[in-house]
């Protein structure tokens, strides 16, 4: 972070209070705050946090996959990304729930970097093969770029958000665009209007979003969540040593309701025994 007047941070703070901190779901607010914190107190400089095929795969700096989405170059970079995340996060978290939304963000943040590396590797293959497509795009510079920022995750979230509203429209430069094509239109326009942005990074985000909405990613995530949930709710019986020295098994109640009923029956039985003793 470059110390001095940070207009982007000020505008982001104003937007947060305009939205109302109480109206922002917990996960969205926490992730946004964490991005701001890492901008003020970065875990690494942007050049040490950005992700590229050369730095990650060849030099084995795998930590960049985790650092890249959470670091930003300057206050304007942070502002535009977090303002967009605020809008998307509020709506998606309310729809999906906080737990699943946090799970989604975690998977998207990591998977975005992996897809980005695959795209850069593909561009390098096109360059070596002298593919005609290379003449249409600056594949050489795209294969060497080092991306940093939350925008790739934002493109993935935009694909998911538009998926839940397929009949809606998005205004891009005052032009109505169907939600089905909005992500692709924005991808091309941002690349043409702001050449310094990462086309490969944004494309990776779109592909991650499509893996979730049209591909197997959502099913895989649900399966993993169900496996973890079943392990937590139904732990395996653990062995123990009884006071007599014999090995046994801990009996686990099938449910809290069943345990409550057992205790109630035991209490009623003890009360009945006490009443009989009194009569005797």
Image: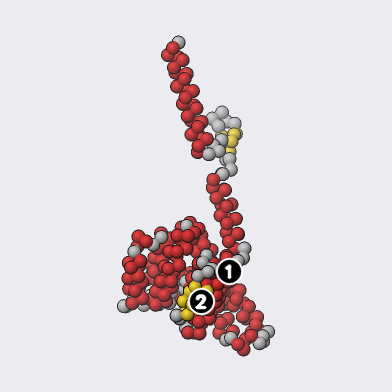
- Which dot marks residue 177? 2
Q: Residue at x 47, y 20 (%)?
A: 272
- Which dot marks residue 181? none
In the rendered image, the residue lying farthest to the bottom is: 135
Callout 1 secondary element: helix
In the rendered image, the residue lying farthest to the top is: 280
Quadrant of res 242? top right
Residue closer to the observer: 231 or 167: 167
Residue closer to the observer: 246 or 122: 122
Q: Is residue 117 left or right of residue 5?
A: right
In the rendered image, the residue lying farthest to the left is: 5
Quadrant of res 184? bottom right
- Label 1 sits on residue: 210
Q: Is residue 29 left or right of residue 132?
A: left
Q: Residues within 10 Å of mark 2 (few under 14, many from 20)?
A: some
Q: Position of residue 111 (x, y in %)?
A: 56, 67
Q: Position of residue 79 (x, y in %)?
A: 39, 74
Taking the image as drawn, is residue 43 in sight?
no
Callout 2 secondary element: strand
Nearer-N-terminus badge (2/1): 2
Q: Position of residue 66 (x, y in %)?
A: 50, 67
Q: Residue at x 45, y 64 (%)?
A: 91
Q: Is residue 210 left or right of residue 269?
A: right
Q: Residue at x 48, y 60 (%)?
A: 95
Q: Residues within 10 Å of mark 1 (few under 14, many from 20)?
A: some
Residue closer to the observer: 191 or 34: 191
Image position of 103 with respect to 148: above or below: above
């Amino acid at each position: 972070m470059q110390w001095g007047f940070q207009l982007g941070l000020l505008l982001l703070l104003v937007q947060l209070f305009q939205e109302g901190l109480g109206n922002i779901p917990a996960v969205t607010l926490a992730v946004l705050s964490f991005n701001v914190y890492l901008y003020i107190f970065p875990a690494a400089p942007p050049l040490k946090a950005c992700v590229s095929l050369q730095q990650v795969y060849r030099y084995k700096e795998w930590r960049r996959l985790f650092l890249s989405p959470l670091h930003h170059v300057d206050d304007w970079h942070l502002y535009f990304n977090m303002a967009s995340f605020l809008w998307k996060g509020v709506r998606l978290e309310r729809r999906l729930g906080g737990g699943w939304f946090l799970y989604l963000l975690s998977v998207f943040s990591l998977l975005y970097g992996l897809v980005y590396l695959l795209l850069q590797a593909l561009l390098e293959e096109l360059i070596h093969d002298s593919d005609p497509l290379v003449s249409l795009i600056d594949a050489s510079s795209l294969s060497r770029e080092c991306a940093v920022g939350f925008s790739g995750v934002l493109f993935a979230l935009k694909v998911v958000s538009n998926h839940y509203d397929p009949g809606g429209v998005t205004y891009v430069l005052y032009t109505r665009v169907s939600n089905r094509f909005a992500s692709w239109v924005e991808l091309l326009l941002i690349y043409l209007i702001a050449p310094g942005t990462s086309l490969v990074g944004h494309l990776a985000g779109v592909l991650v979003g499509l893996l979730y909405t049209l591909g197997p990613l959502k099913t895989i995530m649900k399966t993993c969540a169900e496996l973890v949930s079943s392990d937590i709710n139904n732990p395996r019986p653990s062995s123990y040593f009884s006071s007599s020295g014999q090995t046994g098994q801990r009996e686990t109640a099938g449910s809290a309701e069943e345990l409550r009923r057992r205790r109630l029956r035991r209490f009623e039985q003890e009360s009945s025994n006490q009443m009989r003793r009194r009569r005797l």
